[in-house]
Amino acid sequence: MKVCKKLALGLVLASVSTMVTPFIVQAEKHVSGGVGYHGVGYYRGMDYMRGYYEGRAFVLGAFSKHIDHPTKSYKVANEAKALGDVQSQMEKLSHEPYYYIGKSKDGNSILSSEGQPVMGPKKELHIGRLDSTGKLDVVLYEEAGKTVLETVNTGSSIVMPTKHVEVSPTGLIYAMKGEATSYYNLQGQMLHSKPFKFDKELYGDLHSVGTSNKLVAIFNARTGEYKSDEIFTSLSWNQNTGLISGYQRDGSILYFDDEGNHVESATALKIISQTEGTQPRKIQMPQQVEGERIQRVLAPFSEGIAFVLLGNKQKVAIDESGKILFSVKEYDEIEPYLNGIARVTRKAHGLNFGGIFNTLAAALVKGAFYHQASYGETDYAWTTSKLKRGYIDKTGKEVISSKNQMVSPLTEAGIMTYKDGRFGLYTKEGVEVFPMVYKNITYMPELGAFLLQDEEGRWGVKRQDNSTMLPFAYSKLEVVAPTVLVGKSGSAYRMISLDTFREIGESYDSITAPKPFYGVYSGLIGKRGNNIYLVNPLTGESLLQLPSDTSKVDTATLESVVYKQHGKYGVLDFTGNTIIEPKYESIQVFVGKSN
């Protein structure tokens, strides 16, 4: 049986027992690298917070937040809201019932937070949902090649028509067979007349569904409720207006809010017009420029300037009146202006700029910086090629030389450049911040700081004003978890506080991070000789020495550690007491969502 993750039903937050100690997110003022934050920071496109549970410190790093450059800031209201949101999530996490699921050759077994057997072993046994008291309500397992959905309290069961099954806290069952999807209640009754041949998420729980390949309807995939009839040729959600537009056969449009409620056309059009009023003004491109027709637009108008190719093969910058400002004939590609500068590329040889970024054949350079708002969910990777790149200002002057093999987008700290194996940093006016002598560079925007490797191979940290925060005395330096920096000097690793940039805790042969527990890093893994320790991620203090012959720590929850010994997995609490003996091939932690 495969548990399908297509629906964001919120049932597998994942973990174990009812905890009574509240999780407290401390709303104190931290200052890191001169950048202040109120219990919240920014790390590779994610919010992180510091929290305390039963006196132990934790780092939280799973709260995604897009930051628009170059005005990245956390206003007091946003900080307070973020703090409240995380406080709420962590309180739920610390109080939700949770269970362990141990896998063995006989099948899966469900165990309580105290390690007591609850159900199993059964083949592919999983938890569907819990009841209001935190006890098992619905489970799924495989029997005779079929997926069985069993209601634990009554003992009743349903054999599902497919192996792909998921259960929501509301009692909705989602199943997929081939390309068709269906939704059922706990009595096994399908909530619509035919399987959906088309099923696509619109926003949140709302899906665009259709029983044929012709028309679609709005369907709540959490409750199983139709929010419209199957009358639309297509449906789309607009993130700017928050409206869903349903296009009918006659060309007319019906509007719905993000909960699927119908919105009158007059109201919807008012919302759309108000939203469009906040968008950048669209500038019409002239047909001709000083008597020459425009053959091709190289970059549309942005900040009052566009780049065009004229009929006489001249490449020029023009203003909104069509006046030629300057020539850009030496460049193969030009991007629109952003914050007063435009990125330019030489010797493109017909290659696409975006394609060069993403081609697997390109040689990766060891060095990256992180700016999620500009480049989506992934880190920005440096690549080498025959292309040369730079920036020009609004007069056409090169402020960043176009002889560089790579230039980064503009960050709060400036523009990173790469050429012939060396990195540097410049302001957008072209003023040097770091000379191009560094073999590696990693930008930490939450600190306004850079991890740098000098020409001798030593690592250190500098602020964006070129002042040294951490001396270049390390053979290795890396961020292993949000706010956690680890450095190697000689043969020993030490944690380094990102508040003081001083070494903290004891030295180890290695320091790594296990899988986060739903965004929470409750401990790092320090290894010294044959001993393995769970280490506080903020203070460096040793919390627990794991049993001898421990080969791996899989994850650390708020109160327990899943570890591997002699090839099998078990669970310890934070005092070192055994919750589950190491006898399973794997152990998952399920945090339940009660009704």
Image (tube, rainbow, N blue to C red):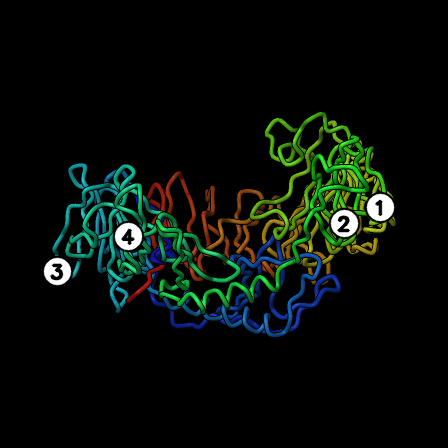
Q: Which residue is mark 3?
A: 154
**Residues at marks 1 and 4, CA–CA distance in whole angstroms:** 54 Å
Q: Residue at x 53, y 70 (%)?
A: 25
* 459 horizontally vs 129: left or right: right
**Amino acid type shown at disc 1:** Leu
**Residues at marks 3 and 4, CA–CA distance in whole angstroms:** 36 Å
**Amino acid type shown at disc 3:** Thr
- Nearer the observer: mark 3 or 4; the answer is 4
Q: Within the image, what quadrant is residue 358 found in?
A: top right
**Residues at marks 3 and 2, CA–CA distance in whole angstroms:** 70 Å
Tell me which numbered mark, 2 or 4, is placed earlier along the sequence: 4
Q: Is residue 103 visible?
A: no
Please tell me whether mark 1 sits on a helix, a strand or a loop: strand
Please tell me whether mark 2 sits on a helix, a strand or a loop: strand
Q: Which residue is mark 1?
A: 325
**Amino acid type shown at disc 4:** Glu
Tell me which numbered mark, 1 or 2, is placed earlier along the sequence: 2
- The answer to whether marks 1 and 2 mark residues whose Cβ atoms lie closer than 8 Å is yes
Q: Which residue is mark 4?
A: 230
Q: Which residue is mark 2?
A: 305
Instruction: Find residue 465 and report its horizontal and vertical position in percent.
Output: 83, 56
Quadrant containing the C terminus in the rendered view: bottom left
- Which one is nearer the viewer's eye here, 445 or 530? 445
